[in-house]
Image (cartoon, helix red, strand yellow):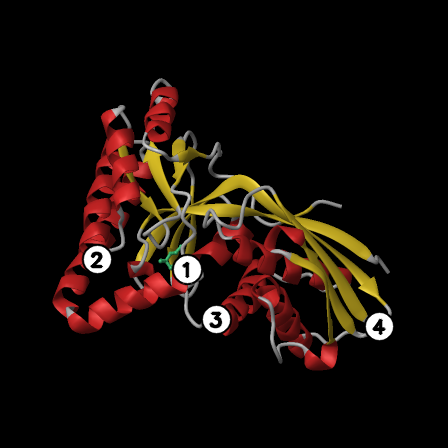
Amino acid sequence: MQKTITVSAPGKLLLLGEHSVVYGYPCLVTSVNQRLYLTATLIPDDELQLEAPDVKINGYKKLYKDLGTGEIPKGARFIEHGLANFLRKYPFQGGVRIETKSDFSSQYGFGSSSASTVCLIKAISELNGIHLSKSELFEISYHTLLDVAGKGSGFDIAAAIYGGVLYYVTPGKVIEPIEVTDLSLVVGYTGIKVDTVQVVNEVAQLKTEKPELVHSQFETITTLVEKAKIALIQKNWSEFGRFMNVNQEALDRLGVSSAKLDAMVTAARGAGAFGAKLSGAGRGDCMIALVSSEKKNVVCEAVNAVGGQVIPIQTNVAGVNIEI
Ligand code: MEV
């Protein structure tokens, strides 16, 4: 039996539809070429061993019988709960050593937790001769996300599994790959790491206090997502950029933009981007701008000039993959 396997999964960026997607509305997401790598090795003892230096986990061990209990460091939660969920469904003898390494910082909001969860379930299932379908892989991974974070739409899990560009409806009700090439983005990192669940909770609070305001923004965003999907298929970049700009206004009304994000959005648009908006929970993480190849450099410079850290990425890449 094979004892070791390495798998990888891509990070993601939300194109349109953040926050409303948590409430069952659709979103558009692209995978990015910065990947998370996970090596799983079967070991004799019934325990989890974890090395994840990118999230400050070194020499972590937990007996199988204690999985999911006691104090779990933040960087180990998804792996530990993911393993517990897998074992409940597919018990296997012996333990597993997990090592992770990421191309990207977990600070960017590219979905490192989701990518590592997907890689874990893929790796340990394959090592045990179980070839999960994409939807089975989604189910266990999404369950794990809910166990750890309490809430979340799961679009990032879908992006890690399927790759490409997806039209997604929670909780994996629709996962539709969109055929698209040449989706060229400039990504600017604010330098601020955001607690996604906290921002999601703040929007939930606003929804309780001002239901009409939030509902109307969600309706607007949904219309934009549907129109943007068509623009994407037609490669109508100026329209797609315009929809991104209107989506940004709606997110601003939900209170999740920030001065830094606004500055980058304005700089990118001023330098000739088709459109620009925050991507993800907001408040920090990243801004994305849709650009032509001619404008890419000048948009990068403009984002840099207002203090954004430009992260070079390519969009629309392969989903979870067995490396060796
Ligand atoms: C965060 O990347 C995107 C949110 O819509 C949360 C989610 O979809 O789980 C804010």
Q: Is residue 56 left or right of residue 153?
A: right
First in sequence: mark 1 or mark 3? 3
Q: Helix, strand or loop at disc 2? A: loop
| Residue picked out by circle 1 | 195
- Badge 3: residue crowd in 10 Å (few <14, some 14–19, many ≥20): some
Q: Helix, strand or loop at disc 1? A: loop
Q: Residue at x 31, y 34 (%)?
A: 234
Q: Looking at the image, can residue 148 be seen?
A: yes
What label does residue 254 carry, if any?
2
User: What amino acid type should be assigned to the residue bearing mark 4?
Assistant: Asp
| Residue picked out by circle 3 | 146
Disc number lying in front (4 or 1) = 1
Give the camera-side residue of 22 and 227: 22
| Residue picked out by circle 4 | 45
From the top left corner, tell me how far across and down residue 53 is, in percent: 66, 52
Snapshot quadrant of residue 62: bottom right
For the residues labelled 1 and 2, say whether their Cβ atoms are less than 8 Å apart.
no
